[in-house]
Amino acid sequence: MLREDSRRNWLCARVGLKRVLAGYLGTRPELIRFTVMAGGKPRLSNGPSFNLSHTGPLSLVAVSHQPVGIDVERRRTIPRALAIAQRVLGADDIAHLQALTGTARDDAFLHAWTGMEASQKCLGEGVFGRRIDTSRIGKQWFSPDPTHIAALAWEKPEATPVTQWLTFRS
């Protein structure tokens, strides 16, 4: 990473993740070791499922006993929202975006994007990986603060998770 602030944010996100996981595992953060699934998703060999997302200095961690994914994005203008949507989002999302303009389109795009990315991460696929069947994924959207939108996804939609929101900033 070329920029110092990006390097610091990346490092702080991972330190925060290890601190959170250490609390669940009853160990010290420096003893946490990850393995990597076929799709690139990190996991603990014997511990809860987890996922990390960060944008700038804001990081979110999801921890669960079932596969989980999380994504957060800073609210901003998305100049090529429709072009990006046509590459990665479904037909319903694209049609919805086409009916909107300005800030409404930007927020709708970020809502669809975070839901898609959290779902893909939940099952270990990347944004451009194999598309998953989202009917078997539960989702919840939220705003950790007024300048961000986020989505949480979990594998069993019938089992709504108990949530506790903790955010940390670098």
Image: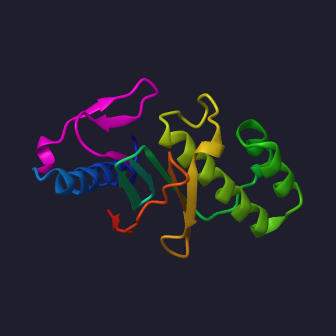
Residue situated in front as seen by the camera: 112 or 163: 163
Is residue 116 in view? yes
- The correct choice, above or below, for 1 with respect to 111 in the image is above
Task: Tell me where residue 112 appears, x and y as whole percent.
Answer: 68, 54
Would residue 113 be found to the left or right of residue 81 on screen?
A: left
Q: Which residues are magenta?
A: 28-50
Q: Residue at x 40, y 46 (%)?
A: 66
Residue situated in front as seen by the camera: 105 or 166: 166
Magenta stretch: includes residue 33: yes
In the rendered view of the protein, which quadrant contains the C terminus?
bottom left
Task: Tell me where residue 52 appears, x and y as whole percent.
Answer: 39, 50
Task: Tell me where residue 11 appears, x and y as whole percent.
Answer: 29, 49
- The correct choice, above or below, for 131 with respect to 51 in the image is above
Would residue 103 be found to the left or right of residue 47 on screen?
A: right
Q: Residue at x 29, y 46 (%)?
A: 48
- The correct choice, above or below, for 123 with respect to 146 in the image is above
Q: Residue at x 87, y 55 (%)?
A: 98
Q: How is the image coloured?
A: rainbow
Task: Tell me where residue 166 appears, x and y as whole percent.
Answer: 35, 68
In the rendered view of the protein, which quadrant contains the N terminus?
top left
Quadrant in the rendering for residue 24:
bottom left
Residue situated in front as seen by the camera: 98 or 9: 98
Q: Residue at x 80, y 66 (%)?
A: 102
Magenta stretch: includes residue 45: yes
Would residue 6 be found to the left or right of residue 48 on screen?
A: right
